[in-house]
Image: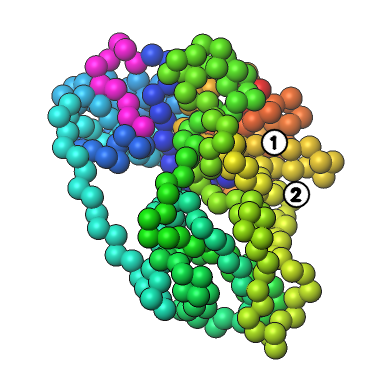
Amino acid sequence: MASLKKIFIVTTMTFVSLSTFAAQQLTEQQAKDLQPFKNITIRGAFYTDNDYVMAMSRAADKEGAASFYITTTNISPSNDTLRIVYAKLYKADAPKAEEQTEKLRKFEGVYEYSKSKAIRLEPFNIIRIRGYFSSEYDINQAIAKEASAKGAYAYYIDSHSQLGSNIQVTAYLFKKDAPVRNLQPEDAIPYDSEAGQQALAQGGDVAMQVEKPGYYSSSAFNEKFYANKFNNKVKVIDQSTNNATTPTATSTPKLGVTAVANELQRITRYTVTLPDGRKIQELNDATAAKMVAFDTIKFRGYYVTDQEISYQAGKRAIDAGAKYYHIARVAHDSNGPNITVFVDLYR
């Protein structure tokens, strides 16, 4: 889903060459493994993502950097083409980033994993409980107790759903030697897009940037898949407070916006669903940077939430014949609450 304060993670693009400049752009994965020697900022009128990437490459050259990683861009409220771009710079012999020892909490003898750790590992079971919990501590205690009974080394709480006075909680369980999952990169190109088909036809390293069948989403677990795999049912642990009538929790966001169901071979993407059933997926910044838009549209209005912006963008993108869309910029009016939203369209 789009965010009003957008974080741009633009990977080295296949379709736009930076060979003119020595400093090369790093992906998020590459950057996090290295120690930067300097942070720099540039500002200027940049009409496309490619413009500020090349400008940053020139600036990195002047600083003697071999590579750079763009962390954030800010858009001026008075001029939607004026941006401030922030980046980290790296030497050719940049040392490896020091690994931080993660401090894990422990409940009932079972460790609690963070999402960043859990998402890389294959769970051996899933538990879903429903009951009245007065605090996060109580939730962790209840989950850990169930996890301990199943012989888990660690657990990760993936979701909470409010059902009346009760809460339904979904958690994944892991063995100490849990196998590593095959994850899709977050910037993978959709295989059913024009860019995806072109990349597959080109072959080589370019084709490797397309979604891979049989790989998991790198941003979310698939609860339905694992619940079916482990034949899991929701366990009500406090019958006296159960006032929910459905066995599973569902939440339908407003404006017809739903989260796309995770599939093994697809990346989890935010999906807009119109009342007539038509759907469209939103691309993140890194994926959109690898693709060529067939059109760009803009609309203006007053919108309070990110969901409203995404819904309006998706609705207009569907009407324009797009299969995917990307919110490129959100510019705030200087004399009022309205915003102008710029949306790139992809087939």
Quadrant where the C terminus sits is top right
Residue 203 pos. (x, y %): 49, 14
Name the amino acid, label 2: Gly
Work out whether residue 35 can be spotted.
no
Residue at 23% over, 38% down = 34
| Magenta run includes residue 23 | yes
Residue at 45% over, 26% down = 49
Dominant secondary-structure state across the stretch colored magenta:
loop
Residue 94 falls in image quadrant: top left
In the picture, the disc for residue 150 is none
Residue 215 pos. (x, y %): 53, 37
Q: Which residue is mark 1?
A: 280
Residue 166 falls in image quadrant: bottom right
CA gap, disc 1 and disc 2 = 12 Å
Label 2: state its secondary structure.
helix
Q: Tell me if mark 1 has few (under 14), some (14-19) or many (20+) residues whose alpha carbon lies within 10 angstroms of its own.
A: many
Quadrant where the N terminus sits is top right
Upstream in the sequence, badge 1 or badge 2?
2
Residue at 50% over, 46% down = 219
Label 1: state its secondary structure.
strand
Residue at 61% over, 68% down = 128
| Magenta run includes residue 89 | no
Q: Is residue 305 left or right of residue 252?
A: left
Foreground of the two, 13 or 102: 102
Foreground of the two, 114 or 25: 114
Q: Which residue is mark 2?
A: 256
Name the amino acid, label 1: Ile
Q: Is residue 92 left or right of residue 237?
A: left
Magenta extent: 18-27
Residue 93 pos. (x, y %): 15, 29
Residue 199 pos. (x, y %): 53, 17
